[in-house]
Amino acid sequence: MIEINDVLVRRELLIAPFQNSVPALFLDRDGVVIEDCHYINDPEQVQLCHGARELVASAREQGWPVILVTNQSGISRGFLGWDDVNRVNQQRMVDLLGADAPIAAIYANGYGPNAPKDSWRKPSPRMILDAADVLNLKLDCSLLIGDRLSDIQAGVAAGLAGLFHVLSGHGREVRPSILRWQAQASQSAPQVKFLDGLDSFPLETFQLASRLIHRN
Ligand SMILES: [Mg+2]
C-alpha cells in the first residue's frame, strides 16, 4: 500500500482488501450521506440524509462496498481538525448508519480551492483511484452519488460506470449547472442520472452494473 505523507489527506480503511475485484458505490458525505451543516465539527449535529442507511444496507446486501469520498476544505481553512472529522465520521455517522449499513472506507481531502493540481480534492479522481488500488475495486462497473458538480466530474475522471446527482445538500442549487455541464460533456462520458434523494435510487442498478463485470 502506498504510504500517505500528505497531512491534508486521510485514508481510513474499515475492511480488508478484496481478493477478487468488485464494483463499489462511492458516496460523497456532506449533503449525500449526512446533512450538510457547513464545516460540521460537532458529532451531535450529525443527521443522516433520508434514505442513506437503507441505501448503504442495500449495497451491502448486494456485496457492494460503500466508499465515502469527501472534500473537507475546513481543514486547510482552519475551521476543523482531523480529530473533528474523525469524531463526526467514526463516533456518529458510522454509528447512526448501524451494523447493517457499514462503510468500507472513508477518504477525505483537506485542501481548499487553491489546492495543487495533483491534490486529492474533487474533481480530482485521486481518492477514487486510490480506493480502487488499495481495496481492489472494479471502477468500470462502479457507481457514484454526489450533490456537487465536482463529485460528478471526479466520477467521470475515474471512469465509473454510473453517476447520480441528488437534490439534497447543494444539489438543488447546482442542478442547473450540472445539466449545462452534461449538455457539453464528452459523448463517451456516462449520462448523469438525476434523483430527488437517495431514497429514489433504483436498487436494480446494482444488478445491472454487476452484469457489466461478466461482459468485460
Ligand atoms: Mg457534498
Image (tube, rainbow, N blue to C red):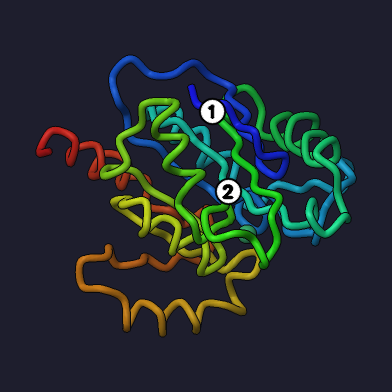
At 59% from the left and 22% from the top, the residue drawn is 14
Q: Separation of disc 2 and disc 1 at Cα?
A: 18 Å
204 to the left or right of 86: left
Q: How crowded is mark 2: few (under 14 residues within 10 Å), some or many (20 or more)?
A: some
Report which residue position mark 1 lands on: 104
Above-or-below relation of 87 to 170: above
Marked residue nearer the N-terminal end (2 or 1): 2
Residue 39 % position (x, y): 81, 56
Q: Nearer the viewer, residue 133 or 89?
A: 133
Name the image quarter holding residue 79: bottom right
At 41% from the left and 85% from the top, the residue drawn is 180
> Residue at the left extreme?
215
Q: Which of 116 and 104 is in front in this view?
A: 116
Between circles 2 and 1, the one closer to the viewer is: 1
Report which residue position mark 2 lands on: 51
137 to the left or right of 176: left
Total numbered labels placed on residues in the image: 2
Quadrant for ligand 1 reads bottom right
Q: Nearer the viewer, residue 190 or 101?
A: 190
At 29% from the left and 67% from the top, the residue drawn is 191
Q: Is mark 2 on a helix, strand or loop?
A: loop
What amino acid type should be assigned to the residue bearing mark 1? Answer: Ala
What amino acid type should be assigned to the residue bearing mark 2? Answer: Gly
Above-or-below relation of 113 to 211: below
**Which quadrant, please, contains the C terminus?**
top left
Q: How crowded is mark 1: few (under 14 residues within 10 Å), some or many (20 or more)?
A: many
Return the mark for residue 37.
none
Residue 59 % position (x, y): 43, 35
At 28% from the left and 51% from the top, the residue drawn is 161
Q: Is mark 1 on a helix, strand or loop?
A: loop
Name the image quarter holding residue 169: bottom right
Q: Which of 36 and 109 is in front in this view?
A: 109
